[in-house]
Image: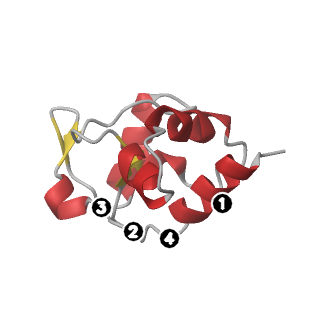
Amino acid sequence: MAKGFDNMCYELLKKVPFGKVITYKEIARALNSKAYRAVGNAMNKNRDLKNIHCYKVVKSNGEVGGYALGAKRKIELLKKDGIIIKNNKIDLKKYGFRL
């Protein structure tokens, strides 16, 4: 069962539209926090991958970052969303989403 902070992260993540990504930092900022690592921990604990698309959460420098099913699978899912990845990075000016 997800905790309160984790659930708040998931609810914000659900607002990210198709073809966009969000950073751990942006989710933390929207929660009036600097707990970027706690956001990452929440994504890592996500057990509802079908409904909570934590593969859409990336590092603030545009790097893809980790994923419960592996970085290779994360890249596949991002590409399926139409996101272009070059040198393991995403253009946040083009694909980034702000809350």
Front tag of 1 and 2: 2
Q: Dot 3 lies on which element?
A: loop
Is 70 placed above or below 3 here? above
Residue at the (49%, 28%) spot, across then down: 70
Kind of residue indicated by mark 1: Asn
How packed mark 4 is, by other alpha carbons closer than 10 Å (few <14, some 14-19, many 20 or more), is: few
Residue at the (51%, 57%) spot, across then down: 31
Instruction: Report which residue position mark 3 lands on.
Output: 82
Residue 27 as seen in the image, left or right of residue 42: left
Instruction: Report which residue position mark 4 lands on.
Output: 15
Instruction: Report which residue position mark 1 lands on.
Output: 51
Question: Does label 2 or label 3 sit earlier along the sequence?
Answer: 3
Q: Position of residue 1 (x, y in %)?
A: 84, 44
Asked whether residue 40 appears in the rendered view, the answer is yes
User: Quadrant where the C terminus lies?
Assistant: bottom left
Report, in whole angstroms, how far the alpha carbon at label 4 lies from the one at label 3.
Answer: 17 Å
Q: In the image shown, does 7 or 47 lie closer to the viewer?
A: 7
Report, in whole angstroms, how far the alpha carbon at label 3 lies from the one at label 1.
Answer: 19 Å
Report, in whole angstroms, how far the alpha carbon at label 2 lies from the one at label 3.
Answer: 20 Å
Report, in whole angstroms, how far the alpha carbon at label 1 lies from the one at label 2.
Answer: 19 Å
Instruction: Report which residue position mark 2 lands on.
Output: 99
